[in-house]
Image (spheres, grey):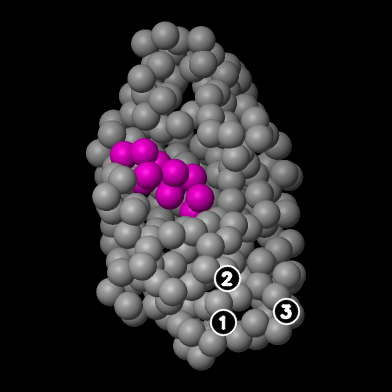
Amino acid sequence: MLANARMYSVTPASAEAWRTIIGWATREAGVPMEFAEHAPPKPLSGLWARGDLGCVQMCGLPASLREPKPTILAAPLPSLPRYGGKAVYMSDIAVRADAPFRTLEDTFGGVAGYTLKDSQSGYFAFRTLLMTKYPGAKYRKIVGGLLNPRGVIKALTTGEIDVGPLDGYVFDLMCAGDAAFAAQVRVVASTDPTPMPPLVATAPLRPEQIQALRTSFLRVREERSLDDARKAVLVERFVVPELAEYDVTKRRAERVEREGEPWP
């Protein structure tokens, strides 16, 4: 079985910390796994479609849509105050740091970007915000295929786009571990929170293996040898959510597809 934490391995320090945490939890559970490299520009959708995943970070939207359903093992609860002590996250809508825009409304009529159309944080969250709070908002051009938050930031700094969404937890990790890169952009709005992307399995684990893995992640908070790793990824502790909690992302995506103006 394979393990992977690419989704939130956004800096060298966070990548090492996730390997440390996941490695400890799987060893403690007695469920051996091998870390799989799946580096950009390979799409995460290809990884998530596999049936041999033992412990992999997966966006809540594809987790809710996937058939057969994945098994939820755990989800991180971020330590920063803006998460309110809940296992949630949001998308930050960013502009270039020296851009004249002060509010999201200031960007209307400009060029908006997004990561990929299967992304909750990089596409559907932004579109839901616009449809809900700014139903008349228009952009003169839409640029897609920016892959991930780093791609959005690069597009902002080069002037390819004026505004774009960043996974808020990714941006917090960047601010903590790659401050110079993160400082190139500025947040002008944030979306409503949705459940934090979980660690899942798609391999046919036995019930006792599932329980052992969940118990190990719940014990991460108590394991002093993992304190530095938890701090590096801004995680207070782990929780075990129900898969049904992620249906909110599916409903929002369905609304965008049903009611929203098509984006290229």
Separation (CA) of disc 1 from disc 2: 7 Å
Q: Residue at x 42, y 24 (%)?
A: 230
> Is residue 123 placed above or below 222 in the rendered structure?
below
Question: Which amino acid type is marked by label 2?
Answer: Leu
Q: Is residue 258 visible?
A: yes
Residue pointed to by mark 1: 108
Picture coordinates of residue 60, whole percent (x, y): 59, 50
Q: Residue at x 55, y 40 (%)?
A: 198
Question: Which amino acid type is marked by label 3?
Answer: Pro
User: In the rendered structure, are the residues bearing label 1 and label 2 in contact, judged by CB atoms less than 8 Å apart?
Assistant: yes
Where is residue 228, by image quadrant? Answer: top left
User: In the rendered structure, are the residues bearing label 1 and label 3 in contact, judged by CB atoms less than 8 Å apart?
Assistant: no
Residue pointed to by mark 3: 135
Where is residue 250, by image quadrant? Answer: bottom right
Separation (CA) of disc 1 from disc 3: 12 Å
* Label 2 environment density (alpha carbons within 10 Å; few <14, some 14–19, many ≥20): some
Along the line of sight, the residue nearer the viewer: 102 or 220: 102
Where is residue 189, by image quadrant? Answer: bottom right
